[in-house]
Image (cartoon, rainbow, N blue to C red):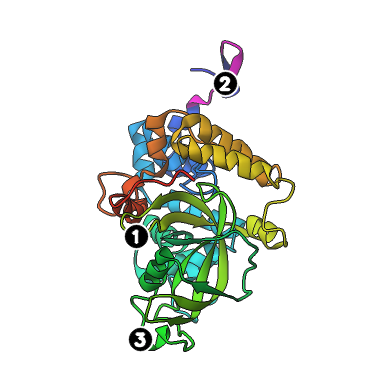
Amino acid sequence: MNAPDETIQGGSAQQQYFPQFEELHEDLMVNILSYVATVPMEVIHARPRSTVTGVLPLVCKQFDQFCKGDYFWRTALERLKLDDPYLWEEGLLRELPADTKASENLVDQLHQTLQIDFKTIFRRVFLNYIRFTGPVFYMTGHVRIGHAFGLHFFEPRYRVLIAEVMRDWPDEARRGNPIEPDDNGRFPTFIYGHMAPLAPTTPACLVQVRTCSIYADGSADVVLVPVAYVWLERVWERASAGRLCVASCVRMGREQTRHMQGGANTLPGHEGFDSDIMRYLAQNGGLENPSHRAMHAILSYIMNDGTPVEDGDDDDDDDDDDYDFDENEEDDMDDDDLVDDEEEAMQQGGEVDE
């Protein structure tokens, strides 16, 4: 057996070898592996490969069993909450009663209150808060979080949009009266595409409808409040809806939001450059192309002020594992679970090129 500090040399690379690892107690193994056990979306806008779902389970059966447990998900949630409370702490709080205050034990508190495992907590926060799928209003301009503005909808596609967004709200909410949030504290919400191009990786904004007057011909006057900047993931046209676009998006973290809120509504130092690259990515296969995923990772690195961004594997087959949990478990979150809404919509229309 090799000594703990012995190295194995293969070609020009040297790899450290620690044979005593397999002699450790399983609890120690799990604790050590937790330092490299990442979960999907730890870098929210770069689609990094997740070691918990696509790397560690493939090493050996023992590691596969470790990944089916709950410990890695708990430590990942704690890490995410600490790294970006703007995104993850708020998402965790949304799963608890409205009067709940943030605390150091928020993850365990949610686990005890809802009596669900940590992987399910991650899934709920991601699907209920971080990702959003809905119709898109597209018009370039400047928006700031919390600054209300008004719009008049008259195009047929946007008449469809506002009718759909207001569909589940009472009649008085469509007659110009102030809109009250529902039992979950939510307002009617849609995506405002305020930056070009309308394509994957372009920043956009989630807006809430605060007042709405819908007229007999379907046109409407609305007052909107921007609540979050997002990254567009996929954009497509809905069939038979007058070229109305639908998109899936994910919320930006604290640093990206701070840059967007700075006034220029674009990340600093990349005016024009980022749009040109994003347009190219969108018009030539989007992030399904391995080369484009690599380009996107580089762009994300630049847009994140030089903070290294973990990239996905260049193999299309392996890329499917980025969001895969354990496909044999009933409550798993895999690619299909994460995109249920947009897949249903995609059946009604093709993807938008620009």
Q: Secondary structure at mark 2?
A: strand
What is the spatial separation of the Cα atoms under label 2 and label 3, in whole angstroms? 67 Å
Q: Is residue 303 above or below residue 107?
A: above
Q: Position of residue 107 (x, y in %)?
A: 48, 64
Q: Is residue 56 above or below residue 239?
A: above
Instruction: Tell me if label 2 and label 3 are in contact, CB under 8 Å.
Output: no
Q: Amino acid at mark 2?
A: Gln
Q: Residue at point 45% right, 85% down?
A: 180
Q: Amino acid at mark 1?
A: Ala
> Which residue is the extreme one toward the right?
269
Residue 267 numbered mark, or none: none
Where residue 62 sits, quadrant-wise, is top left
Q: Nearer the viewer, residue 123 or 17?
A: 123
Q: Secondary structure at mark 3?
A: helix
Q: For mark 1, what is the residue?
A: 241
Crowd around label 2: few <14 · some 14–19 · many ≥20 (10 Å): few
Where residue 273 sits, quadrant-wise, is top right
Q: For mark 3, what is the residue?
A: 171
Q: Nearer the viewer, residue 101 or 292?
A: 292
Q: Secondary structure at mark 1?
A: loop
Tell me where the magenta segment starts and ends, as one range: 10-19
Q: Nearer the viewer, residue 320 or 38?
A: 320
Q: Position of residue 171 (x, y in %)?
A: 35, 86
Q: For mark 2, what is the residue?
A: 15
What is the spatial separation of the Cα atoms under label 1 and label 2, in whole angstroms? 57 Å
182 with respect to 203 (left or right): left
71 with respect to 142 (left or right): left
